[in-house]
Image: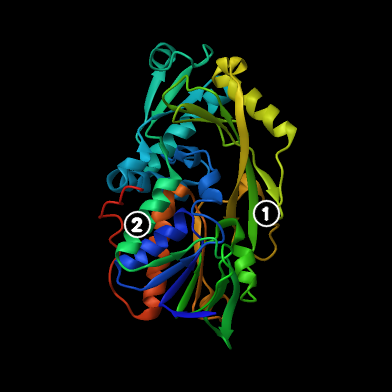
Amino acid sequence: MEKLETQVVVIGGGATGTAVLRDLAMRGLHAMLFERGNLSEGTTGNFHGLLHSGGRYAVKDQPAAKECIDEQEILRKIAPQAIEETGGFFVVLDDEDEEFLPRFLDGCKTVGIPTEVLNTTEALREEPKLSPKTRYAVSVPDGSIDGWDLCMGSVAAAKELGARTFLYTPVTEILRQDDKLIGVKAVDQTNGDEYVVHAECVVNATGPWAHKVAYLAAIEVPMVLSKGTMIVLDSRPHQRVFNRCRYPTDGDIIVPVGTTIILGTTSVTIDDPDSFGIEEWEIDKLLDQCTEMLPMIDDMRIQRSYAGIRPLYEPPSEGDEAEEGREVSRAFYVLDHEELDSVGGFVTITGGKVTTARLMAEKTVDVVCAKMGIETPCRTHLEPLPTAC
């Protein structure tokens, strides 16, 4: 058993965990990251690839929308290699969509999302494969982003500054001494090596598994786990992201990624992020709904389907029933367990989007640094992210 020492242990190798590692290293802290599989294996590697303009949340969840529009502008500056500038359309097809349109435009204006309204002729000139039933299309700065590139870039930057990563090495135990965490135990699944790591702080950045990791420290983190199913089709007939101009629901988004398009998504509440399946009705609904925006889907072939788990968190409140799925905010939360549970040296970051992972990391590391008396400011929004190797 190898004994190691560091200042901060980060658990989780997705977009948020690797961004936390990079931020810690850039502020001069020594940190180690432990991931039970490979980088980007969880939610980051199983989302639809959308770089959010914030338009999807501009009416219902404006704080999340504001985070998205601000962060996507930063990501375009620091990580252009991970982004395709597709642009996006919010598509108006019927009376219900048209009734929603003024609220959508007002919401975008409120949070600072630039829009341009195109009529039928203009929209079909830009995207000829759109449904001829299109009444309007609202242009927004959506894009496509590669989560793997983000993770690899963050890790490369952190390693240059002395950070270490341990892949396929799940944390099996969190070391707690009275009312403070003092480190972790982990086991390398490739060779059986065991590690005992002493640290001043542990950051739980495990997305849908955040409640399971917190349980290792005898702490409860109430999560709402929302499964989103997606379908990959066999070609790319359009350039832009297509969103239906309405409240977010099943089958209302088509994201071009590389040479394919991805149809999404459903929202099904599940109990276990390690045990779920894709149901036939989800595939049927995605195809039916997305075909309304893009009729030629009827003539395309399915390459594969997959699902990702949204790690949603809703602060508990007395007297209110727990919300599910699309009713839960897409905002993120930094949980300081010293304040919430009287357990020092433990911080959980949960909720949010891949688009907002850098900001999530910044706010998390702000909390860690405050506890350690470190005043070095964040620079992750200023310095380019290395290209993934």
Residue 181 image offset from top left, x and y in percent: 53, 81
Q: Quadrant of residue 133?
A: top right
Residue 66 image offset from top left, x and y in percent: 41, 47
Secondary structure, mark 2, is helix
Residue 40 to residue 319: above or below = above
Give the residue type at disc 2. Ala
Residue at image position (29%, 74%) is 375
Residue that mark 2 sits on: 156
Secondary structure, mark 1, is loop
Q: Quadrant of residue 264?
A: top right
Please say whether residue 145 is visible from this viewpoint.
Answer: yes
Residue 292 image offset from top left, x and y in percent: 59, 20
Residue 79 to residue 178: above or below = above
Quadrant of the rendering where the N terminus is positioned: bottom right
Residue at image position (32%, 58%) is 157
Residue 265 image offset from top left, x and y in percent: 60, 36
Residue that mark 1 sits on: 274
Please say whether residue 243 is visible from this viewpoint.
Answer: no
